[in-house]
Image: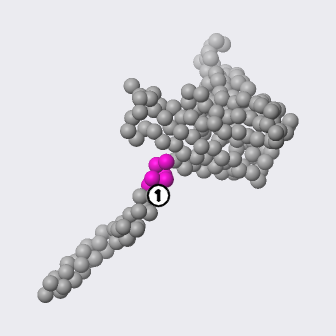
Amino acid sequence: MAVRSVLFSELICDLKKEELDWLQSQIEIIREPAESTSEQSDDDESSWYGPRFLQRYKHIWPPMDDLPFQIEFCETEPSGPYAWVHSVAGGDVTAVCVLVQEFLKKFRPHDIWTMTFANVCEPPTPGAIGGGGMVVSADKVYAVTDYDLIAWLERQQCQLQYPRLVNIATQSSQELLTDADSEKEKEGNDHA
C-alpha cells in the first residue's frame, strides 16, 4: 500500500517580540467545553480541541491533539528571531496558510508570504508525486500545483501546434458543423 505525504519547510522571518508571543499563543492546543444538552452526560467528550488559530474553523477541522505541522522558534538568524514551519512525516499546507494569513492580518497586512511543498509517495506511484506553491496575503491565499502548471503548458503547446483545435474548443457545435461543411466544400473545389 502506498503511503502519501506532503513535505514543506519555510521560515517566517524577522519576528518582533509581540509577533513571536502571538504565534506561540496561537499554536497552543486548547479545549473548548462541550455545549451541554439534556441528552449529553457529564463525561461526554464531544468538545472541540486543537490549536487556537483553528478554533474559528472548528466546523472544518476535526478535533486534534497536535499541530498539523511542525513549528520551531529560533533566535539565531542575523535578521532577528524566526519561526521555522515544516513537516516531518507529512503536514497540512492549508493549516499553515491559515496561521500565516491570520499573522499577516494582525501584524503585516501589506506583506506576502510564500511556501512550496512536495507531494511524495512511498513506494513511488505514477501520478502521485508532485508539488506546488502557496502565496499568502492578509486577504487571499493562492495555490498553484504541478498539475496546474502542466495543464497551462499543455494549453500553450496546443495553441502553438494546433491553433485551429484551440479555436474549435471555444465554438458551439452548430458553428463546428457549419465550419466542417465549409471545409469539405473547399476541399471539393480544390480537387476540381
Give the quadrant of the C terminus: bottom left
Query: In the picture provided, is 55 more to the left or to the right than 3?
Result: right
Please tell me which residue lies in front, 42 or 186.
186
Q: How is the image coloured?
A: one colour
5 vs 39, nearest the viewer? 5
- Can see residue 166? no
The magenta region covers 146-151
Residue 147 is a magenta residue: yes
Apparent side of residue 101 relative to residue 3 in the rendered image (left or right): right
What residue is drawn where x is 56% and y is 34%?
A: 7
Q: Which residue is mark 1?
A: 152
Above or below residue 61? Residue 161 is below
Residue sitting at x 54%, y 34%? 6
In the rendered image, residue 55, in percent from the top left (x then y), is placed at 68, 32
Q: Position of residue 148 (x, y in %)?
A: 48, 52
Q: Does the rendering let one see residue 34?
A: yes
Query: What is the x, y in percent for residue 94?
Result: 60, 39
Q: Name the quarter where the N terminus is drawn.
A: top left
- What residue sits 54% from the left and 45% below the top? 132
Q: Residue at x 37, y 70 (%)?
A: 163
Query: Hey, what amino acid is under mark 1?
Result: Trp
**Residue 63 vs residue 114, the one in the foreground:** 114
Residue 173 falls left or right of residue 98: left
